Image: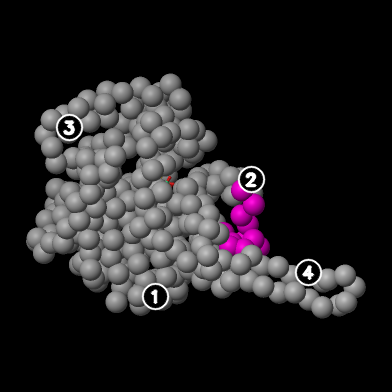
């Protein structure tokens, strides 16, 4: 399934958007005013939030689960880790992160109970760990919170989860707060990607790791042609059938084609200050995972 290609590059950053006017940006293949894009993206995810998880499974034939597993395996978190999962939507990455912590040999659940009348309190726990799911759309967070409750994850559980609404370009967190930052299938929807990356760098602790899972550019022309046929002709129809919303899924497909290629994105991450920036392609480059460290 995975075609891995790890690479480091010093290629010059190009204007990936192709839009020179400072006031304008892309919304899929449309050119729109920057100030309008945020609310247009919000509308997309408000519209699809209730069927979002189902559509992910249908569109990717379940493969998005393997890509997300790969992201968490790459991160390999241990107890004591604090994750900021930006554009975290309904919590897929954060749930995997918390599940992974619980399988760590160094994880001891927080036990706090009295024994048989002796008054002795037994306490045994590993370092606390947490995931903060951060997203601009309250409707996506609400879907995620429901899923979290079903899984037993709350702000009081160990490890814990919390849900914060806001814009990834202005994070409401202090400098040097988290030791892991993930963004999965979210960054291409943001208006100012360079600003998102600078904010990621700011809130990570020294030694902290940035990981981004995003749709990428398929290098092989034949595979790219087949993938384009599926993306442009099949996915919008599925969106209409499952979510009753063809336009939102047309936007999502178009936004993938407008996202910078793997090497251009490496340069953007480096420009934000990250070191040891690498990427690996998944499934012929349909997706890639970019990694960087704040040293
Ligand atoms: C395709 S979903 C990905 C959700 C989740 N990370 C996953 O992998 O399933 C993209 C998410 O990005 C969020 N988003 C878009 N623009 C954002 C921004 N500027 N700041 C924070 N979240 C944003 C959307 O609300 C949506 O939940």
Is label 1 or label 4 in front? 4
Is label 3 or label 1 in front? 3
> Per the image, is 236 magenta?
no
> Which comes before the other along the chain, label 1 or label 2?
2
Q: Is residue 25 visible?
A: no
> Does the numbered disc 1 mark a residue whose Cβ is under 8 Å from ligand 1?
no
Comparing 190 with 23, the one in front is 190
- Left or right of 259 on screen, residue 133: right
- Left or right of 132 on screen, residue 36: left
Q: Which mark is residue 205?
A: 1
Q: Which segment did they paint magenta?
A: 150-162
Q: Kindly identify which residue carries mark 4.
A: 113
Residue 61 placement (x, y as % from top left): 38, 31
Q: Circle 1: is it few (<14), some (14-19), or many (20+) Cα within 10 Å?
A: some
Q: Residue at x 20, y 59 (%)?
A: 266
Comparing 248 with 58, the one in front is 58
Is label 2 or label 4 in front? 4
SS at mark 2?
A: helix
> Per the image, is 160 magenta?
yes
- How far apart are labels 4 and 3 at the CA level? 58 Å
Q: Residue at x 31, y 31 (%)?
A: 250
Is label 4 or label 3 in front? 4
Q: Quadrant of the C terminus?
A: bottom left
- How far apart are labels 3 and 1 at the CA level? 40 Å
Pointers 3 and 2 in contact (C-beta within 8 Å): no
Residue 152 placement (x, y as % from top left): 64, 52
SS at mark 3?
A: helix
Residue 256 placement (x, y as % from top left): 26, 41
> Which comes before the other along the chain, label 2 or label 4?
4
Q: Residue at x 20, y 27 (%)?
A: 226
């Amino acid at each position: 399934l995975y075609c891995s290609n790890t690479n480091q590059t010093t290629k010059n950053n190009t204007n990936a958007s192709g839009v020179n006017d400072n006031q304008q940006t892309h919304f899929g293949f449309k050119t729109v005013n920057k100030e309008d894009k945020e609310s247009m993206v919000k509308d997309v995810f408000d519209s699809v939030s209730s069927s979002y998880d189902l559509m992910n499974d249908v569109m990717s034939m379940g493969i998005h689960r393997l890509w997300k597993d790969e992201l968490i395996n790459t991160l390999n978190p241990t107890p004591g880790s604090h994750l900021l999962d930006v554009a975290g939507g309904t919590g897929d990455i954060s749930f995997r992160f918390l599940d992974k912590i619980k399988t760590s040999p160094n994880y001891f659940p927080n036990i706090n109970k009295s024994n048989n009348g002796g008054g002795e309190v037994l306490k045994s726990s590993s370092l606390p760990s947490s995931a903060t799911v951060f997203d601009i759309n309250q409707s996506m967070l609400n879907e995620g919170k429901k899923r979290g409750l079903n899984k037993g994850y709350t702000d009081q559980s160990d490890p814990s989860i919390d849900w914060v609404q806001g814009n990834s370009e202005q994070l409401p967190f202090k400098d040097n707060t988290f030791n892991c930052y993930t963004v999965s299938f979210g960054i291409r929807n943001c208006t100012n990607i360079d600003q998102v990356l600078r904010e990621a760098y700011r809130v990570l602790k020294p030694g902290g790791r940035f990981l981004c899972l995003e749709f990428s550019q398929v290098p092989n022309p034949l595979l790219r042609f087949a993938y384009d046929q599926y993306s442009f002709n099949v996915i919008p129809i599925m969106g209409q059938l499952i979510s009753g919303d063809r336009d939102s899924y047309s936007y999502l497909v178009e936004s993938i084609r407008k996202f910078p290629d793997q090497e251009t994105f490496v340069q953007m991450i480096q420009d934000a200050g990250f070191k040891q920036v690498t990427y690996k392609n998944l499934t012929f480059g349909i997706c890639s995972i970019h990694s960087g460290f704040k040293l």
